[in-house]
Amino acid sequence: MVSVAIVSPLEIWSFGMEAILQSSGFTVVGHWTDRGEALAAELPGVDLLILARRLIEVSGRTNPFRPLDGDYGGKIILVLEPEDDFSTKDFITLEVEGLLLSSARVDEVRDCVASVEHGRRWVDPGIRLLLGHAEPPHPDYNGLSERELEVVRLAASGLSNKRIARTLHVSDGTVKMHMHHVLAKLRLASRSDLVWPIDDIPAASTAKGQALHLVHPDQQPPKDFTKSGA
């Protein structure tokens, strides 16, 4: 079971976060208001640290920066207050697994922690807005297989996993596996982050180099439709 520690000067917020994490199956070893006290309490043995931004100095750095480097080697989710001093440069240089606003919804907190636990970086959509980036960075599709590209295009068009499975003639479990790989490769937190226009997503191609025509499951495919292997 994943162990979590919370370090924040906001005690009431920390109690609420602890309740959310415990209800989601995580073990909270404790919460502290001072990072020195947390480190003295054998924090290095904890899997995941939820750390308040205001307890570390971030601004003005130009090189990659890892909070508590040398003192703590686990994964870190940094929590920001809307009024915290945090720039685009800080966003680029800061090396943490998750960035979360203190005002995040319960489902966003759970999504963040679960994503970080599984090795994916998670950034609160609200932080992008604060930095002036309403849309997430455009993903690099080069690392996706042809089947994964098919799944991405169908998901971006609004189809559920079950309907994607019907379209591609595979099982629901196969679609879930492809979706897991897609999110990991694109460094996305969840399926809901596949929000780019479908025309921006490259079409998968057959071995002969012909573009696949991805169709809605309720429509008949065109005559030149070629089905790729599962």
Image (spheres, rainbow, N blue to C red):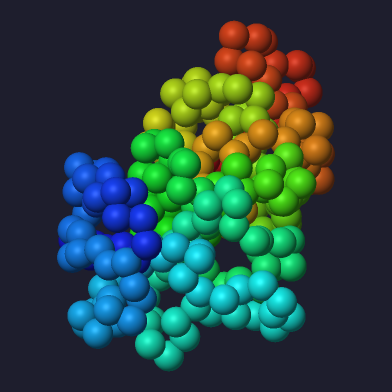
- At 44% from the left edge and 63% from the top edge, which residue is drawn? 52
- Up the image or down, 77 lies above or below 181; here it is below
Image coordinates of residue 190 in percent, x first then y, are 50, 42
Q: Foreground residue, 158 or 96?
A: 96
- Up the image or down, 190 lies above or below 91; here it is above
- At 53% from the left edge and 52% from the top edge, which residue is drawn? 81
Number of marks present in the image shown: 0
The quarter of the picture where residue 10 lies is bottom left
Q: Is residue 47 left or right of residue 225?
A: left
Q: Is residue 72 left or right of residue 99?
A: left
Q: Foreground residue, 103 or 71?
A: 103
- At 68% from the left edge and 68% from the top edge, which residue is drawn? 90
Image coordinates of residue 139 in percent, x first then y, are 71, 51
Image coordinates of residue 79 in percent, x first then y, are 47, 57
The quarter of the picture where residue 57 lies is bottom right
Image coordinates of residue 38 in percent, x first then y, are 28, 76
The quarter of the picture where residue 210 lies is top right
- At 74% from the left edge and 27% from the top edge, which residue is drawn? 213
> Which quarter shows the N terminus?
bottom left
Q: Is residue 175 left or right of residue 139?
A: left
Res. 158 visible in picture: yes
- Up the image or down, 126 lies above or below 198; here it is below
Q: Residue furthest bottom?
A: 70
Res. 228 visible in picture: no
